[in-house]
Amino acid sequence: MKKKIVIADIAAAAGVSTATVSRVLNTPSMVRPELRARVEQALRAFGYVPDAAARALASRKTRSVGAVVPTLGTSIFARGVEALQNRLGEAGYGLLVANSQYDLEREMFETRTLLERGIDGLVVVGNERLSEARALLRQYDIPVVVTYVCEAADGMPAIGLDNFQGGYDIAQILVEMGHQHFAVATSPFSSNDRIRARRHGILTCLEHRGLRPPPDAILEVPYTMEHGRKALRELMGQFPQITALICTTDVLAIGAIAEARALGLDVPRDLSIAGFDDLDFASYLDPSLTTVHVPTEEIGRLAADTLIAMIRREPVAMSTELPGRVVQRQSTAPPRSAEALPRKKPSRTRPKGQRTTLSG
């Protein structure tokens, strides 16, 4: 029978102590790079695989972290998860990922599944969740970090941007360009605090300037490009005087740009369109999309650092606000004069720096 490889074999091959091998396996960031490289080379040479079950039983830690995100279908969350995983890996933690499809019931199911696997900590998105899910997190009493919002709630640290301010800022830029006739297309917000805050920020800015759109010019539609197209088609059919459309996500804005082209509208000369998220391909569209940049990679890295600190019972920042800056591109411009260039009704109608608050 083949001899089972143990830590002592790895230590002898690498010329280090068994304690050093153990640190490389459990807390690699605490080992000098040259020693870590020697141990990792020996681990690969022997094909050593740690007995995770035995380690978890002995330490009551699995060295795994869970994350529940709304979707992995867009870069806004996919890149954040990648950054989270990379940072956790540097500290010797693995990542288990689930997606909730923007459904709070499914989020609770996926959260329960991860908790039952014995994860040491959890990363979630936003503060909106079922009361049963909140009770579940209290029951398991593990470190939880909330991302993509900056307002801490239920004793859980939050890392993200001020979505309200991002919405306010992008509306303000369009107002300062001279736009007076606005419409808003938003993805569902009843159970999504990020979208709700963005919408509120947009409408608050417009209200402050006396430019709030009529109720029918504020459309809530599903989170797809096709519904972004349908939203613009409906809005232009009812309100042909609109010169600016603000969307609470890039996905809706991209659909709106496609529909504007189909309706014979020039973006941005006839209609300015803005989004929110700054997806990877936003800068490659024609025209490129004006949007609010969400710092996804930084959110992922800081979430990992915060969670590891909490696992180690170290003090962490309860509220970390990252800047959600507006990126101005080709899809927005000052409106051209309605008197000089009258607009035609479309032929198709219908269907700030980082801020932290410390807590010990």
Image (cartoon, helix red, strand yellow):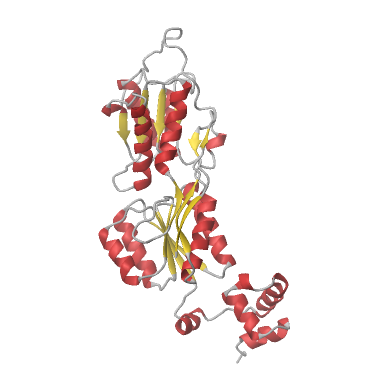
Q: Nearer the viewer, residue 88 or 197?
A: 197
Vertical side of 273 occupied by 189: above or below: below
Residue 31's spot in the image, x, y percent? 65, 74
Judge from the rendering whether residue 201 lies leftward or rightward of residue 31; answer left or right.
left
- The image quadrant of residue 69 is bottom left
Q: Residue furthest top?
A: 340
- The image quadrant of residue 260 is top left
Residue 72's spot in the image, x, y percent? 45, 52
Q: Is residue 252 visible?
A: no
Q: Is residue 192 visible?
A: yes
Judge from the rendering whether residue 36 lies leftward or rightward of residue 230; answer left or right.
right
Q: Quadrant of the N terminus?
A: bottom right
Q: Nearer the viewer, residue 215 or 45?
A: 215
Q: Nearer the viewer, residue 353 or 214?
A: 353
Vertical side of 229 occupied by 46: above or below: below
Q: Residue furthest bottom?
A: 1
Residue, x 27% and y 27% (percent of image)?
Answer: 216
Vertical side of 275 occupied by 309: above or below: below
